[in-house]
Image (cartoon, helix red, strand yellow):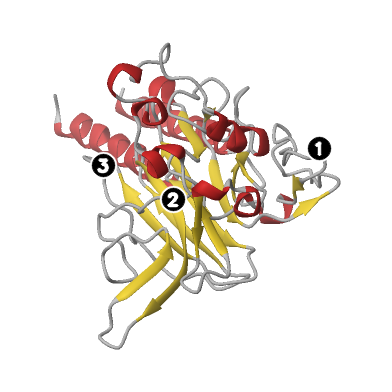
Amino acid sequence: MGSTQFSFLLYLLTIQISVSGVFSTTFSIVNKCDYTVWPGILSNAGVPLLPTTGFVLAAGESKTISAPASWGGRFWGRTRCSEDSTGKFSCLTGDCGSNKVECSGNGAKPPATLAEFTLDGAGGLDFFDVSLVDGYNIPMLVVPQGGTGEKCVSTGCVVDLNGACPQELKVMSVDGGDNVACKSACEAFNQPQFCCSGEYATPDTCVPSAYSQVFKNACPRAYSYAYDDTTSTFTCADADYIITFCPSPNTSQKSTDNHNTNTPAINGGNGTMVYEGAEYDLSGASRTTLRQFLGVVVAAVAILQIQQLV
């Protein structure tokens, strides 16, 4: 192979790498609670880390994070956090045990509402869910933006489950005045039928309990127990994502021309609660369309270069 042809191949490779880099997935973390939330992030083993593992988000604030291709991990919200006189940081719910705002590779102590992602998985799809398997501490909604696919829809738990939490699952504030989180039955009782462990470690033997059904009735798209896959796992191609804490309930869904038309209202359990999410649309054009456009550009450049070589 001549030096000219070799240089040309390197040139095309550089273009391809540049195009791929443009399409990292963007997560927009939005706090619509009327109190401060400290989001935590845990990356799966063997994948590149995100630029942060924890930060503070005051009421009304948002933060955008870019994730590399094939990233996987989870997001959650920590509440009622503070520093003691020695500088040790801790949270009453969702604490990650790092003693600081950054979680640094630690996960959430249950109970905590989790948003879980595997990007660029089987078939090139993103897989995502909102899970209450480890309990619940804060309303959360995931809304895909600009993606495609039959199951590319919003999911989450938009209702305040702390108020409806069974007495035996409640986590109370330090002074005992407020119910701040709701344990899973597994966390509360540590019994195999609730934890899907031991002889209950298969989909056939581990079935919904009366406790997990409380979660499922209120939040029908969220994971309520370990084998709740069929109604709780969602997929998108070429999407970015908005993760909102305390999404606003309303009686009608808002939409715009740019909002994902596959994103229906989330029923909050009473037939009326849905999410207002259109104002956080991140992109006017789908990433699939942009990929196709840049693919045409790269092909055109390649043809011109080949014509010059022959």
Say the numbered circle drawn on residue 271. 1
Q: Residues within 10 Å of mark 2 (few under 14, many from 20)?
A: many
Q: Residue at x 23, y 37 (%)?
A: 10
| Residue 147: quadrant of the picture | top right
Along the viewing direction, whichever of 206 and 219 lies nearer the viewer: 206
Residues at marks 3 and 2, CA–CA distance in whole angstroms: 25 Å
Q: Residues within 10 Å of mark 3 (few under 14, many from 20)?
A: few
Nearer the observer, disc 3 or disc 1? 1
Residue 287 lies, with reference to residue 249, above or below; the image says: above
The amino acid type found where label 2 is placed reads Pro
Where residue 250 appears, as percent x and y from the top left, is 81, 51
Quick one: label 3 or label 1, which is nearer the N terminus? 3
Q: Which residue is mark 2?
A: 111
Q: Residue furthest front?
A: 168
Q: Which residue is mark 3?
A: 47
Nearer the observer, disc 3 or disc 2? 2
Residues at marks 1 and 2, CA–CA distance in whole angstroms: 26 Å
SS at mark 1 in the image: loop
Q: Residue at x 26, y 34 (%)?
A: 8
* Disc 3 + disc 1, Cβ < 8 Å: no
Along the viewing direction, whichever of 191 and 302 lies nearer the viewer: 191
Taking the image as shown, residue 18 lies to the left or right of residue 57, namely: left
